[in-house]
Image (cartoon, grey):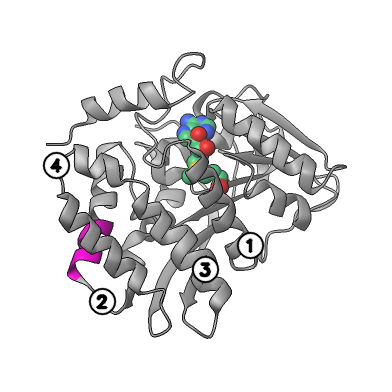
Amino acid sequence: MYTAVNTAAKTAAKSPVNSAVNTTAAPRDYVHGYSDHETRRLADQADTLAALLHTGTAYPTGSRVLEIGCGVGAQTVHLVDGSPGAHLTAVDVSADSLARARARVTAHAPGARVEWARADLFDLPFPDASFDHLFACFVLEHLPDPERALAVLRRVLRPGGTLTVIEGDHGSAFFHPDGAAARTAVGHLVRLQAAAGGDALIGRRLHPLVTAAGYDDVVVRPRTVYADASRPALVEGFTRNTFVAMVEGVRDDALAAALTTRAEWERGMAELRRTAEDDGTFHYTFFKAQAVSPGPPRPRP
Ligand SMILES: C[S@@+](CC[C@H](N)C(=O)[O-])C[C@H]1O[C@@H](n2cnc3c(N)ncnc32)[C@H](O)[C@@H]1O
């Protein structure tokens, strides 16, 4: 059966973050990995969902914004577009992802003012209250203790500064034609992510998490993506290239963990792909939380 121990060993082989960076508080594994396939998937996801996820996020000229877990810069380019006058700093634990992020932003907006730092969000190399706004997208879902992460991040946010967090929730995925094998395959991803210390169902927990971490004025709004044949760009960009690609990405881990057989997996993927055909439909809900920092972090019991 699948264990956190064999996950950690696999990660050590495939992840660039293990040798050179202090990973004491980093996730034991990152379920999606750092492959070219995942780089493309993150970019497709961000570009397809940019309007849905970034509407309402625009930071004033001169404000200091920190993006946490920027990955390959898939969201960073949209932050730059939405807040061209802000001073953006982007951090990630992965040096390789940061290099890709820098290249992506430079190609997209050559004059953009972005500073890059390889850092663990639990141990950020910035003075207290250095930022007016924090932004994190699809990061908390990979952390064993997202509440502690949110609480720790308050140190670098000035009192009155804002936090924006975007997460998905795979329990919100439903589709037509429905299929038991498809649902089982999605369930395998949820289980693998949980075994790696994450939570693929975190969207529904955002309000209590952000509140418990000590933020004020917490507001969470669902942002739903619904794709059918009348929206071919969403079918391609979201159903095929984001969701189906994400599930496909854990095939080897699911097989290695003996969660499934090759035949059952292929049945599940065929059912999922089927939802992107002309008579198929796909629904998924993201959750966007916005909150305000009241001041220095409260010690946690
Ligand atoms: C799913 S990716 C999301 C990337 C980007 N925010 C996006 O939406 O495309 C999660 C990112 O969080 C980073 N990450 C995970 N744990 C971290 C930590 N403790 N400190 C900083 N970054 C972390 C990973 O390296 C990865 O690049």
Q: Position of residue 182 (x, y in %)?
A: 25, 65
Q: Is residue 153 left or right of residue 247?
A: right
Q: Earlier in the sequence, mark 1 or mark 2?
A: 1
Q: Earlier in the sequence, mark 3 or mark 1?
A: 1
- Residue 178: numbered disc: 2
- Give the CA separation, mark 1 to mark 4: 36 Å
- Give the amino acid at mark 2: Asp
Residue 291 makes an appearance in the image: no
Task: Label 4, secondary structure: give it.
Answer: loop
Task: Label 3, secondary structure: give it.
Answer: helix
Q: Earlier in the sequence, mark 1 or mark 4?
A: 1
Q: Position of residue 216 (x, y in %)?
A: 54, 53
Q: Earlier in the sequence, mark 4 or mark 3?
A: 3
Q: Out of 138 and 227, give the one closest to the viewer.
A: 227
Q: Depth-wise, is mark 1 or mark 2 nearer the camera?
A: 2
Residue at the spot of label 1: 50
- Residue 236: numbered disc: 3
Q: Position of residue 29 (x, y in %)?
A: 36, 32
Pointers 3 and 2 in contact (CB under 8 A)? no
- Residue 258: numbered disc: 4
Q: Earlier in the sequence, mark 3 or mark 2?
A: 2
Residue at x 59% of width, y 64% of height: 48
Within the image, what quadrant is residue 258 found in? Answer: top left
- Give the amino acid at mark 1: Ala
Q: Out of 269 and 259, give the one closest to the viewer.
A: 269
Residue at x 76% of width, y 57% of height: 82
- Give the CA separation, mark 3 to mark 1: 15 Å
